[in-house]
Amino acid sequence: MIKSAFAPVVAASIALLLGHAAVAGSEEVREAPKALRGVWKARSVSKDQGKTEDQIRPMTVATVSANKVKHPTGSTVNLDKVVVVRENGAGPLSLFKMSDGTVFAVTEKKTPGLFMMQVLGGSPMKETVRFGFAVEK
């Protein structure tokens, strides 16, 4: 579950990712936003939905292009859908649905250039891990 100012719109936007009707405040786009394209270098990790956050040595968690995500293992998946949510005057939340069914929810942190990614999976969909990261171009 995503706990933020976006929460009401996020649930509906995840439904949009899964093929349901669009909702106010969200928009389906064709490609990953340009600000999120590049090598994602994690700097922190949380396995308890953000209650605790451990700093880590920077490590690559993904390489993102307009339409693909390459994992550090070398496997590449297509971006099936990207939904951008703009709500409550906050920075955008980008929801990525990959061809393998994985969903990333990405928001910009208060520090410019730093982002937070929540990896969502399962049924019902819930957060499995969270990373704080920067994008290297």
Image (cartoon, rainbow, N blue to C red):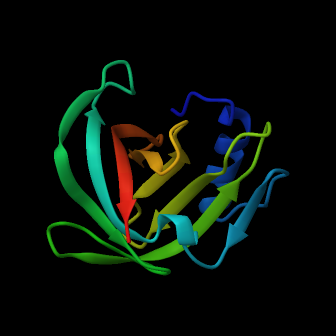
Percent x, y for residue 22? 79, 60
Percent x, y for residue 102? 39, 59
Q: Nearer the viewer, residue 1 or 71?
A: 71
Residue 15 versus residue 90 in the image, above or below: below
- Give the side of residue 98 with respect to residue 15, left or right: left
User: Measuring 34% from the left and 76% from the top, which residue is drawn there?
Assistant: 77
Q: Quadrant of the C terminus?
A: bottom left
Residue 57's image quarter? top left
Residue 35's image quarter? bottom right
Q: How many marks?
A: 0
Q: Nearer the viewer, residue 7 or 136?
A: 136
Percent x, y for residue 55? 22, 32
Residue 19 versus residue 114 in the image, above or below: below
Percent x, y for residue 50? 39, 26
Residue 78 versus residue 123 in the image, above or below: below
- Residue placed furthest toward the front: 112
Q: Nearer the viewer, residue 24 or 32?
A: 32
Q: Nearer the viewer, residue 86 or 23?
A: 86
